[in-house]
Amino acid sequence: MAPKKPIGKRGIRLMLALLGLILMISGLMFLSAASAKMRRKAGRRQLRLMYGGSGVDENLLAFDPTSSAPAVDKKEHVPGEGAASAVVDEAAGATPSSVDTLGTAHAPEGGCSLHSRGADPWPFYKVMKASRGDVREYPAVGWLGDAKNLLTLDDARFRSDFRFYIHDDGVFNTSQVEDCYLRKMGIKRDLSNVDWKLPVFKRMYLAEPAIWPVLRTHALRTWNPEEASLFVVGFSPFLTEGLTCPGFPSSSAKYEAEVVKKLSSNKWYQRKGGFDHMIFFMRFGMKMGAPVKQMLDSGSLVVTTDRLFWNVVKVLPNIFKSNSVVMAPYVTPYYLDTTPPGEPEMQNKHNDTWYFFAGTYSRRFGGRGKLAVLAEHLSQGFVNFTDLRVPKTITPNNGLLQHSHEIVGQAVAGIRRSSVCMSPQGDAVTSGRLFEAMAGGCVPVMIAPKEGAPVELPFPSLIDWDSVALFTDNFDAISKVKDGINVTGRVMEELVGPKASAEAHARLRCMQRQARRVFVKHLSYMQNPLGLTDSILLEVWVLLQKRGLIQGPFFLDSKTETPPVS
């Protein structure tokens, strides 16, 4: 047996170098963990300073996105099964006396509208009446100034007559696109960690991973194209932007070109020139190749969140000259969407933040900076308006994503504590704050021009928007009137202020409960994606009738140029 060679100086140096490297890596890992812990503490401290220690949701502050998602105590539903989108009544905040046998929540007798009689005090207006006159009614069902004309998701004619077919083979395979996007972004299938993985301005548009799984298993889906009234195109430009997924073209341009090529040669697309086809395009601000632009602008139905996004009229002008758009809500933060059953959002309202706003005062349209002036005309000590700026340039390693979801946490805590939440227009007439307020049981005040609001709101055939929100003209218009902002503050105080009448407060609480119910039933991507998808399909059903493509009980002669029913 050969004797062991002694370790020489070179070997010792190598061992010491290796040991030093191990110690350095351990130190960096320790510092990284300590830094993350300090950031979390700083975020919690900021929330406590801003909203008070007793009002902040400790589960929100302590949530670890790498752990399992917190349980949402609600009955499970199987997408596509049952005559209506049934989430338990408690999850919608409804009492047994206010719910019919199909689980449809109703407002108390007479509704919650604060303007049930007479004209609305300027600058407030009823959105369902604002759609009359110069504004083209859209889609002409639900915008008749009378909530009795609203439809329901369990409408027997909708359930029995309407069927849709999905183009989902080859390049249309959205299941592969979803898996690719969620895996590469590190997002869980139930979206429970989405606020920790995406900045606000991307999370707001992440609708398709919630909608597509429901469509694939829906009771109204048919595998026989002969039976279909609608054809849904498996095309997700938002999910594929900047990503290369296995089995798909290597760039967005090539992907779009392949989709257009396959679709334009399809006999079912050719049958009516694509007018009975529906395409998801969730963010118009993305770059769009000429083939896709031509396809969309030729008349296909478009499901989107930004109907009046400032760039859309320039990019796709024709879709606004015909009935071609179905509005979908923005995606709300996970912790607002999945508020537990019952009405916890009604139990933690605080007077010190009666009126709430969190966001940037600087915006392209609407004069949002005047919020600071409005605050001076509201009850002092009851206003919590904060100018918060979400960072735009975010990468996984620059620390700004942490800052982004801390800002989301601030907004979530504030909404849950508040009674009236400001929702001024952003780049579009609506903003995500409208749906965030409803999710948190806070009555939204949508500050937007009356000529734009009626065509921006989702599901006008289903939702009585005047029973869940207030509407006032934007600050650009208000500021043109002498003492306009002063008058706005005074009227708001009379309608929903902390010192308003007992009757006004009763209506305010009714609107808070109704807003939450409507959100759960129609607008929730995470708690009730079936109800949201059903709402999209019902509006499409109505829209196809108005376009003259199918016969139905709400068919109206279209004033736009649409092909006749074949």
Image (tube, rainbow, N blue to C red):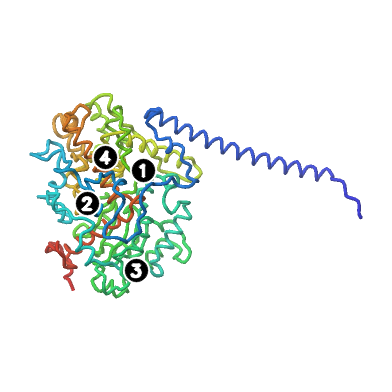
Disc nearer the start of the sequence (1/4): 1
Q: Label 4 vs label 3: CA separation? A: 37 Å
Disc 1 marks which amino acid?
Answer: Pro
Quadrant of the rendered image containing residue 178: bottom left
Q: Is mark 4 on a helix, strand or loop?
A: strand
Q: Label 3 vs label 1: CA separation? A: 36 Å
Local packing at callout 1 (Cα closer than 10 Å; few below 14, some 14-19, many 20+) is many
Residue sitting at the far top: 380
Where residue 196 sits: x, y (%)? 44, 44
Q: Label 1 vs label 4: CA separation? A: 24 Å
Q: What residue would you read off at disc 1? A: 340
Q: Nearer the viewer, mark 1 or mark 4?
A: 1
Q: What residue would you read off at disc 4? A: 423
Disc nearer the start of the sequence (3/2): 2
- Which one is nearer the viewer's eye here, 156 or 131? 156
Disc nearer the start of the sequence (1/2): 2
Q: Is 247 placed left or right of 121 in the picture?
A: right
Disc nearer the start of the sequence (4/3): 3
Disc 3 marks which amino acid?
Answer: His
Q: Label 3 vs label 2: CA separation? A: 36 Å
Where residue 167 is drawn, which disc sits there?
A: 3
Eyeballing the image, is 75 above or below 348? below
Disc nearer the start of the sequence (3/1): 3
